[in-house]
Image (cartoon, grey):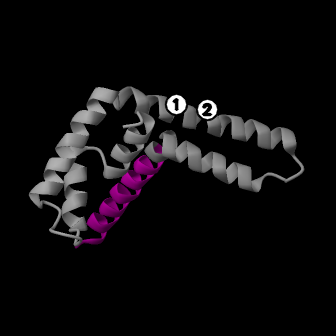
């Protein structure tokens, strides 16, 4: 690889990483991490500052919970639970007490939701 090509590739990689980092810090997860870091850096005696950061964190968590509840209605939860149970009974994730976690993760990724999401929704709707 020529020197010029190397530097062009390196610049492109740095630019791509920078864009990905910017997108992350704009996301809810990035905002939560930034607020957590800010909270950890505040003086323990700064009650007003800590209260403001905690209020921002709570607002993000409330928005996440509202979004989750909107997506996981009672009917959707029941349907996804039936679908999940059919896959478990079919042996897609292994037989008996042996679980094939790779198959489970692949299925979760394909579905766009996880078993943890399902369990959370079941508790939310008391099913």
Q: Is residue 63 in the magenta section? A: no
Q: Nearer the viewer, residue 122 or 29?
A: 122
Residue where numbered disc 1 is placed: 63
Count the marks: how many? 2
Residue where numbered disc 2 is placed: 59
| Image quadrant in which the C terminus is located | top left
Give residue 79's position: percent from left, percent from top. Answer: 22, 34
User: Residue shown at 25%/66% (left/top)?
Assistant: 101
Give residue 122's position: percent from left, percent from top. Answer: 37, 40
User: Residue shown at 9%/56% (left/top)?
Assistant: 90
Placement of 113 over or under 95, stated as above or below: above
Q: Nearer the viewer, residue 74 or 103?
A: 74
Count neighbours of disc 1 (C-alpha within 10 A) and say few if under 14, some if 14 to 19, many if 20 or more.
few
Picture quarter containing residue 95? Answer: bottom left
Give residue 80's position: percent from left, percent from top. Answer: 23, 39
Picture quarter containing residue 5? Answer: bottom left
User: Residue shown at 20%/49% (left/top)?
Assistant: 85
Answer whether labels 1 and 2 touch (C-beta < 8 Å): yes
Per the image, label 1 sits on a secondary structure element best described as helix
Residue 2 is labelled as none
Per the image, label 2 sits on a secondary structure element best described as helix
The majority secondary structure of the magenta stretch comes to: helix
User: Residue shown at 26%/34% (left/top)?
Assistant: 78
Placement of 13 over or under 45, stated as above or below: below
Q: Nearer the viewer, residue 95 or 15?
A: 95
Whether residue 92 sits left or right of residue 72 in the image: it is left
Q: What span is in magenta? A: 1-22
Give residue 42's position: percent from left, percent from top. Answer: 79, 51
Count neighbours of disc 2 (C-alpha within 10 A) and say few if under 14, some if 14 to 19, many if 20 or more.
few
């Amino acid at each position: 690889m020529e020197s010029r090509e190397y530097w062009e590739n390196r610049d492109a990689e740095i630019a791509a990483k920078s864009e990905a980092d910017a997108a992350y810090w704009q996301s809810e997860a990035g905002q939560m991490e930034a607020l957590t870091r800010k909270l950890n850096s505040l003086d323990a005696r700064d009650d007003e500052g800590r209260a403001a950061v905690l209020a921002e964190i709570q607002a993000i968590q409330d928005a996440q919970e509202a979004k989750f509840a909107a997506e996981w209605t009672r009917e959707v939860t029941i349907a996804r639970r039936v679908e999940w149970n059919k896959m478990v009974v079919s042996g897609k994730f292994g037989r008996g007490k042996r679980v094939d976690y790779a198959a489970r993760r692949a299925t979760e990724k394909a579905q766009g939701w996880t078993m943890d999401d399902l369990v959370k929704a079941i508790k939310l709707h008391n099913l």
